[in-house]
Amino acid sequence: MRCRPFRCEGAMDFKNTYEDPVRAEAYSRLEFPGTYYLAFRDVPSVFTRHAAGGRALDLGCGSGRSTRFLCRHGFSAAGADISEDMIRRARALDPGGDYTLIGEGDLGAFGDGTFDLVLSMFTFDNVPTWETKLKLFGEIRRVLKKAAVFVNVVSSPEIYRHEWASFTTKDFPENANARTGDRVLIVNTDIEDPRPVEDVIWFDEDYREIYRRTGFEVIERLEPLGREDEGIAWVNETRIAPWVIYVLGSG
């Protein structure tokens, strides 16, 4: 494994953003503004090409934004998250929805071969160690049906180095020197809370190493860019991709 000892052993004091009730409340009201729009815009076409329907798991569902997104695109979707507060918010916003509280790296609530699709929107930006990532990817592969698809949407390392319609990083020049496993800071300007969010940066070659070790194959990799005709005041989004969409086959 090509990671340094500190990064492999993990940052035990890393705090998940969504465990903060004030921040959780702010994020629960977000839908698809600004830069977030690009994370979701191309995902329906991915569904059409690789997983047109069936049973889906939204891993790291938060308050259920992406779970509801799955349902609108023809899936019978279940949401799962490690944050009790976010699961409570998801159930309040969507009383008829299916939301499950899970432990870190543990999908034991779901049986083998349960899902036709697993979708993860930004979840792995908040999973700090190689060990936990490997365990969770292994669990994802277990709960997928044979030949099913995992769509993993993550922050591009570039998002922590530039300015965006929905984010600012200008006060954190140290982000430019971050390597896989390092903590980075970013401010979401679409919410009222001005405090920086702490994420974990992860680079393409290291995601690919995790995929290889857990038996996933990269079927498709997308870097969505903004278009001038979309009516959004893009900053760098038309030339630098803030997100990466990995489409993974489970074999």
Image (tube, helix red, strand yellow):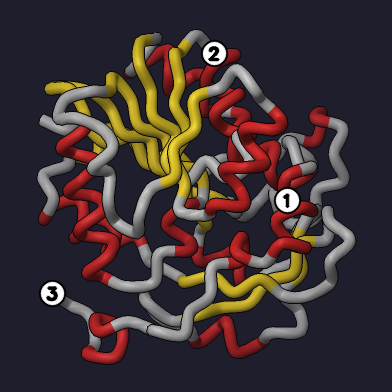
In this rendering, does residue 10 appear at all? Answer: yes
Along the viewing direction, whichever of 99 and 241 lies nearer the viewer? 99
Classed neighbour count for the residue bearing mark 2: other residues with Cα under 10 Å, few (<14), some (14–19), many (≥20): some
Question: What residue sits 62% from the left and 42% below the top?
Answer: 88
Quadrant of the rendering where the C terminus is positioned: top left
Where is residue 92 drawn, in percent x and y? 70, 33
Where is residue 76 drawn, in percent x and y? 44, 14
Question: What amino acid type should be assigned to the residue bearing mark 3?
Answer: Met
Question: What residue sits 29% from the left and 56% below the top?
Answer: 105
Where is residue 1 drawn, in percent x and y? 13, 74
Q: Which residue is mark 1?
A: 27
Question: What residue sits 68% from the left and 69% below the top?
Answer: 162
Where is residue 240 drawn, in percent x and y? 61, 55
Specify which label sits upstream in the sequence, 3 or 1. 3
Q: Quadrant of residue 167?
A: bottom right
Q: Which residue is mark 3?
A: 1
Q: Is residue 213 left or right of residue 235?
A: left
Q: Which residue is mark 2?
A: 73
Along the viewing direction, whichever of 149 and 13 lies nearer the viewer? 13
Classed neighbour count for the residue bearing mark 1: other residues with Cα under 10 Å, few (<14), some (14–19), many (≥20): many
Query: Alpha-carbon distance for marks 1 and 2?
Result: 22 Å
Question: What residue sits 62% from the left and 29% below the top?
Answer: 41
Query: Alpha-carbon distance for marks 3 and 1?
Result: 35 Å
Q: Is residue 141 left or right of residue 70?
A: left
Q: Nearer the viewer, mark 1 or mark 2?
A: 1
Q: Is residue 88 left or right of residue 5?
A: right
Height in image: 62 above or below 75?
below
Q: Quadrant of residue 128?
A: bottom left
